[in-house]
Image (cartoon, rainbow, N blue to C red):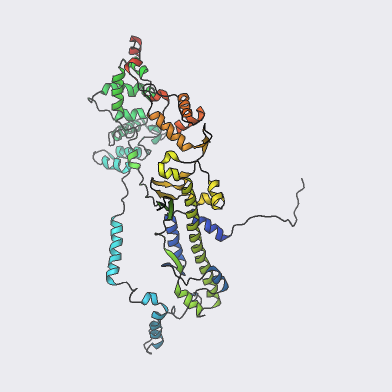
Amino acid sequence: MRLSFGQEMRMAQKQVLAPRMIQSMEILQMSIMALQERIEQEIEENPVLDQGEDDADMPSESESEEGSLPDAPDSPDAPSEEERELVINETTKNEEDFERLMKMDEDWPDQFDDHSRPSRGETEEAGERKLDAMANMVARPQSLQDYLRDQLGWFGIEPELRAICEKIIYNLDSNGYLQGRLEDLLGLEATRDEHALAHRALALVQKLDPPGVAARTVQECLLLQLIPGVPLFEQMQTIITTHLDDVEHNRLPIISRRTGYSIELIQQTLAEIRKLNPKPGAEYNNNPVPPITPDVFVEMGEDGKYRVRLEDGRTPSLFISPYYRKLFAEGQVNDETKEYIKRKINSAQWLIDSIQQRRSTITRVAQAIVDHQTEFLSKGPEAIEPLKMQQIADKVGVHVTTISRAVDEKWIQTPRGIFPLKRFFCGGTVGADGEEVAWDTIRIKLQELIDNEDKQHPKSDDQIVKDLAAVGVTVARRTVTKYRKAMNIPSSRQRRDWTEADGPPPSSADADE
């Protein structure tokens, strides 16, 4: 292989995305809330962009490129007449300054009009709205660590013990468990007395509320929540200590043989154990779920067909400020300012066009999805049809990546509830009758079969395959197993309800174990 430096000419074809195209794709992918934030940011950064009612005289993009651009004040290097500082000169009567003040109402009619000037009542009302918004803000919920530290104040403990307790508290995970060994918190050079003090601190933290906090295993967490003297205390202690694995796999007959408890007594004990909380710290880590704002609404027309309506009432109408158009048309700006305003006008027009393109694309895509999933809207999720993004792309006449951006983070309000637009895209398989069946339909039928089965003789995955085939859905056993696990449905052994007749009488050897 020869390495050398030199120049050469080469012809190649490549696609380069223009900034306007990139901005259009970004606007299309935004949700309604993100779009509102983007518009507010653009209004703050672009002085020629304004919001309000649609302006019929707004110049088009072609007009902007030809030079019919709305005007703006002079650049900082060449301050305009209005931007010059007013200077009080005691030797003159300042006629020029007062004349400029008088002209401001002509150059800024929107700002100096009596109808648009905010009154004292409006100013006070705006201030009250801000105070109300601040008062109604959701307070930050108390964390588990803060709650435990507050409880430490109830005990009159020495500073050394309190310091180790706080170290334990701040090493708890989101579920309230102490990760790792207690000795790891002390370091390699810790003395025997320090280890003893750490065990005292752990015992103290484990007495705090919520019960079970600072445990190192699920077994320890459940045992910390047991209260001596409660019904079935000894049975719960025995099962938690030695048979949690059997409980997980629903091996009640084995527990019966080794403990001597009857199946009925074990089931009663398990019912009490299920009242305990294996994740005592989880309730302090609930993040508030943000409200969902639908981007599209579906309504049924008089002809019985579903129509989509884009939610853009929260999105302000954007236009170019008429003040800049008037100022520029009069030719009272220099070349540098004219170039500055041209860039701002083009940026504003790109944003306006991108928002309009977003509205058109989302409306067409949503309508095509609704037309394909009419049975879903009329009958429910079990009637969903298999649908791929490529099908909608072919129907709308755009690239499939455009469909992906149009449905990303978008929600649709339907008579069946609020769904993400991606919910309507799903694969499928061919049934016994040759018709394509959606995977969501298979999952629903699988759940129905398991809900209606005899719990003393639950269906195996092989039996579920046969039952699905009986209703015209042909799937493999591995598919049923994969879907069952994805839906967090236990195996047939774990779903079984045991009775006294299922377990042989315990032997004396088993009872002694």
Determine the residue located farthest toward the front in the rendered image.
303
Quadrant of res 444: top left
Quadrant of res 234: top left
Give the percent coordinates (x, y) of residue 285.
35, 42
Q: Residue at x 45, y 50 (%)?
A: 410
| Residue 186 seen | no
Q: Which of the two residues, 404 or 259, is positioned nearer the viewer here?
A: 404
Q: Is residue 299 left or right of residue 277?
A: right
Q: Which of the two residues, 386 or 161, is positioned nearer the viewer here?
A: 386
Q: Is residue 513 left or right of residue 346?
A: left
Determine the residue located farthest toward the top in the rendered image.
508
Quarter the N terminus occupies: top right
| Residue 154 seen | yes
Residue 407 vertical placement versus 53 (above, below): above
Give the percent coordinates (x, y) of residue 329.
50, 78
Residue 96 vertical placement versus 156 (above, below): below
Give the percent coordinates (x, y) of residue 16.
62, 57
Q: Which of the two residues, 192 or 111, is positioned nearer the viewer here?
A: 111
Determine the residue located farthest toward the left in the rendered image.
229
Quadrant of res 89: bottom left
Give the percent coordinates (x, y) of residue 123.
30, 68
Quarter the C terminus occupies: top left
How many dots with numbers? 0
